[in-house]
Amino acid sequence: MEDKKIYLVTKQHTSNYPSPISLLKGQDVIVGTKYEGKEDWNNWIYCYTKDNHLEGWVPEQIIHIQGEDGVILEDYTAKELNVKVGEELVKIKELNGWLWVKKASHAEEGWVPKENVKVINKQY
């Protein structure tokens, strides 16, 4: 079994999106604007569900874009994890400047900015 990297939170992160977009493979979306900011968060696109009930940032890599429409290529949720300095996280996936992690203390998972954590020498 592959060892998973453990990260220590060095800067608190609180989600600004209490109702994150969740999408299923094959779901149609409306493609909005690409993220542009000072952070190194390339390849994020703001998308809307066809019924306009949910919206949020989606990795460009999982969208088959055709004009202003897109089809989602894999299940996805934009759930950000609220973390505090000193918490330990287990990295599951890295994408576009963000990490999908699980809190080491319990099973809660979500996205955190990679710039808010650092790798520590500890095995999980």
Image: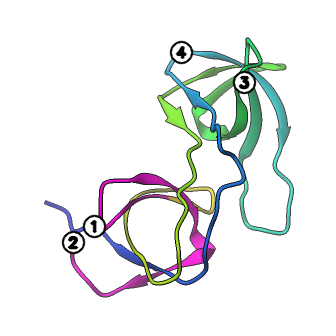
Label 4, on which residue?
Answer: 26
Region of the chain picked out in magenta, as a range? 100-124
Determine the residue positioned at 67% across, 39% down: 60
Task: Say if mark 1 contacts mark 2, CB within 8 Å.
Answer: yes
Nearest the eye: 14 or 110: 14
Task: Give the tally of numbered discs.
Answer: 4
Name the disc covering residue 54, or none: none
Label 3, on which residue?
Answer: 65
What amino acid type is highlighted by mark number 3? Ile
Residue 116 position (above or below residue 29) = below
Give whichever of discs 1 and 2 has the lower sequence position.
1
Determine the residue positioned at 56% across, 45% down: 79
Task: Say if mark 4 contacts mark 2, CB within 8 Å.
Answer: no
Label 2, on which residue?
Answer: 124
Q: Name the image quarter holding residue 63.
A: top right
Secondary structure of the residue carrying numbered label 3: strand
Q: Name the image quarter holding residue 95.
A: bottom right
What amino acid type is highlighted by mark number 2? Tyr
Label 1, on which residue?
Answer: 4
Determine the residue positioned at 65% across, 44% down: 18
Q: Residues within 10 Å of mark 4 (few under 14, many from 20)?
A: some
Secondary structure of the residue carrying numbered label 1: loop
x, y percent for residue 100? 47, 55
**C-alpha distance separating marks 4 and 3:** 12 Å
Q: Taking 37 as reference, is 92 left or right?
A: left
Task: Say if mark 3 contacts mark 2, CB within 8 Å.
Answer: no
Q: Nearer the viewer, mark 4 or mark 2?
A: 2
Give whichever of discs 4 and 2 has the lower sequence position.
4
Q: Nearer the viewer, mark 3 or mark 1?
A: 1
x, y percent for residue 25? 49, 21
Q: Taking 41 as reference, is 94 left or right?
A: left
**C-alpha distance separating marks 4 and 1:** 30 Å
